[in-house]
Amino acid sequence: MNWIGLWTLTSREVGRFFKVYRQTVIPGLISSVLYILIFGFTLEQRISSIEGISYTIFIIPGLIMMNTLTNASSNPSSSLLQMKLTGQVPDLMQAPLSSLEISLAFIVGGVVRGVVNGILILLIGMWIGGMEVLYPIATIGFIFVVSVAFSSMGLLLGQLADTWDQLATMQNFFLTPLSFLGGIFYSVNMLPDWAQTISAFNPIYYMINGLRYTTLGFSDSDPQYSFVIALLMSIGLSFIAIFSMKSGKKMKQ
Amino acid sequence: MNEAIKITNLKKSYDKTIALKGIDISIKDGAFFGLLGPNGAGKTTTINILTGLVNKDSGETKVFDKDTEKDFRFTRSQIGISAQEFSQDWFFSLEKLLYFQAGYFGIRKKDAESKVNELFDKLGLNEKRNSRLRQLSGGMKRRFQIAKALVHDPKIIILDEPTAGVDVELRHELWRYFKELHNTGKTILLTTHYIEEAEKLCDSVSIINNGEVIAEGSPKELMKSEGKEGLTIHLSKSSSKVKKALKNFTYTLEDTRIHFTLKDPEKALPEIIKKIVDSGSHIASIETSKSSLEDVFLSLTGKGINE
């Protein structure tokens, strides 16, 4: 292993998003605070509680998860696409770095951004919403596993994308709708049977409910099932992303 | 003497275009080697396969006798490449980028420090070490590109069009630096559009055209074997009809300078003068010269290196 090379590229990836924290960290915090204030506190007057949990607190795990997976996936995808468009890919491909080392560095970059964003919103939820976390270690562990899965997905997208438009399509047409439909603002039990069946095919539904369980002790889905799906996604997607990097598809000519 | 680079029967196609038809190149350790060819001849493809940026279809590429795919860690660490295209970075300073580059090659920051300082000094970029790439002029970007190639102190330096777009003064400065590097024992592989550059710097060259090596040897040998002479005519007024008038000759035309490669310039001169004058152009001066690498190139490829 080229450990110094791996460390260098990882620190570049982490350093890059911290350098532009106004784009990569602050927006998620602001939108989450707004969701909590506007959706939470206003709708709380009408929706008294879900399974005995106040509506404001109910939505916080979903907000944490939405920010975690969005940030984890967009870090490697945007960084890699930017490197492609600015001619920096040769610097990596011509260095004595293996596909595994390059992939790991990008995945770790995305994981750090996903975990940092997730934990900051968790802290905001505790501070503004007064949420108490039932299983803190499992919560952080779950945020970590989901970050690995979506950072790997972001790495794959970054390899395949040629334009910003293609990346935005993925974000706007898949990630955001699936997050909202995964039950950030509602319990799936409130939906008609057919909609509940469709929700079972949405992987983000399991991510949100897994975190809802580790924080609030309540979940629409079986918590063990949520954890297994997150783990399988993180293993599967990281393998696919690394394998794709090894093949050189869209990276080499 | 050991071979620093050995390329055997290298083939590469992009969809239906054949880029390399079976290239063979051997570069001795310590050589200053020139790879010449017109645009699209396959120079950059060859270099990119050697350095891992392009996957080959077939053939063998070795660096110090090690395969560039199987032993990529070793072979890539031996090579520093100054690419033809500038890369950009929106986030980090030049200094940071140079440390990153060293890090990718497995060199810790504290171990790279003296080399980074030396390169900033040597390439006149000291004042710009905290600047971003976009704040640099073309010449400075070119110098930084060279610094990146050298930061891990490689044994082989690949310079892909290293003086493209730089002014004459900097070009001569860089030539001096390349010679200095060569004198320290580095093997240099140079691709260039400036024939004069190859003639001045290289001890051996390969001329590549349409994905094939069509000539190789030292510039002197090649010039001797081709045995043709050069004729350069400078025009004080150039007519658009001049190209048509000279269609039966092999020449390169750059602004008002026309360079011919001829077996017997004295015999052809009256006809050339007549055709130029008839086309409406005015001749300012005429020079004849002994065979140069430009003549060899022109004679072998039938076109100028910039075409």
Image (cartoon, coloured by chain):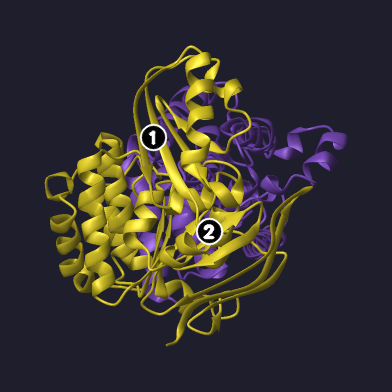
The three-letter code of the residue at mark 1 reads Gln
The three-letter code of the residue at mark 2 reads Glu
Where, by quadrant of the figure, is residue A174 drawn? Answer: top right
Could you tell me residue B213's position as x and y percent? 61, 62
Say whether residue B57 is left or right of residue A96: right
Q: Which residue is mark 2?
A: B226
Could you tell me residue B91's position as x and y percent? 32, 43
Observer-nearest residue: A105 or B127? B127
Indicate whether A241 appears above or below B250.
below
Measured Cα–Cα span from mark 2 to mark 1: 62 Å
Q: Where does the C terminus of chain B fall, quadrant-wise?
A: top right
Q: Are marks 2 and 1 on the same chain?
A: no
Mark 2 is surrounded, within 10 Å at the Cα level, by few (under 14), some (14 to 19) or many (20 or more) other residues, namely some
* Residue B293 in view: yes
Mark nearer the viewer, 2 or 1:
2
Instruction: Specify the chain shown as purple.
Output: A
The chain ID associated with circle 1 is A
Observer-nearest residue: B148 or B283? B283
- Most extreme residue toward the top is B280
Q: Which residue is mark 1?
A: A23
* Residue A105 in view: no
Chain B shade in the render: yellow
Q: Where does the N terminus of chain B fall, quadrant-wise?
A: bottom left
Observer-nearest residue: A168 or B125? B125
Could you tell me residue B260's position as x and y percent? 49, 39
